[in-house]
Image (cartoon, helix red, strand yellow):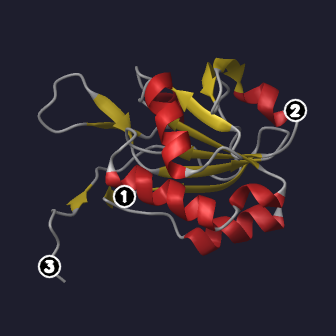
Amino acid sequence: MDLDFEVVDLPPADHVEAGDEAPDFTRPLVNDEFWEDVALSDLLADAPVLLVFTPMDGAFPSTYIWNELRDRGMDEYGVQVVGVSISTPYEHMTTIEERGIESFAGLFSDPQNGVAEKYGISHSLDGMAGVSEPRPSVFLVAPDGTVEYAWVADEWPAFPDYDAVEDAVIGL
């Protein structure tokens, strides 16, 4: 297969694993109408969270991931589907509308990439001093804060095994 881009191996990541406690954080959570600061622990008080880290909005991996999760109806299994990226709230509002993911719980805006750093999945962008973004990752977090499922990309681009994600969500 002739790809229009190079597949790049990412360095090993010391990331949060299944069985670990999910690091809590507070960031602006954006939906299709507004945003407000929300803590992950506040969301977990309502239901489990499928925490999805993507590169910046508009990047093809982000687009593909959101389309696949939407098409699978991942939010219909009793979990809150929540994204995290370095994109601004304004970019997130556009992504929510363009991807048709208004039924998801929202997208956290994390321009300094601090949440990805807490999860051990920060990735420096080539040729951009001091600029990083999260590597594609998925964490299923139970209401008690325990990570029940974890997937982290080891190359770019890489995508989660959506069947495995769906099985983990159904099994929670």
Percent x, y of residue 46: 88, 36
Q: CA distance from mark 3 to mark 1?
A: 21 Å
Tag shown at residue 2:
3
Number of callouts: 3
Residue sitting farthest toward the top = 37
Q: Secondary structure at mark 3?
A: loop
Q: Secondary structure at mark 2?
A: loop
Percent x, y of residue 57: 40, 40
The residue located at (64%, 36%) in the rendering is 106
Quadrant where the N terminus is found in the figure:
bottom left
Residue at mark 2: 45
Relative side of 157 to 76, left or right = left
Percent x, y of residue 25: 64, 23
The residue located at (16%, 24%) in the rendering is 129
Residue sitting farthest toward the left = 127
With respect to residue 34, does 8 lie above or below?
below
Pointer 2 or 3: first along the chain: 3
Would you call the spot at circle 3 few (<14 residues within 10 Å), some (14-19), or many (20 or more)? few
With respect to residue 7, does 84 lie above or below?
above
With respect to residue 11, does 9 lie above or below?
below
Tag shown at residue 154:
1
Would you call the spot at circle 2 few (<14 residues within 10 Å), some (14-19), or many (20 or more)? few
Q: CA distance from mark 2 to mark 3?
A: 47 Å
What amino acid is found at the position of numbered circle 3 in the picture?
Answer: Asp
What amino acid is found at the position of numbered circle 2 in the picture?
Answer: Ala
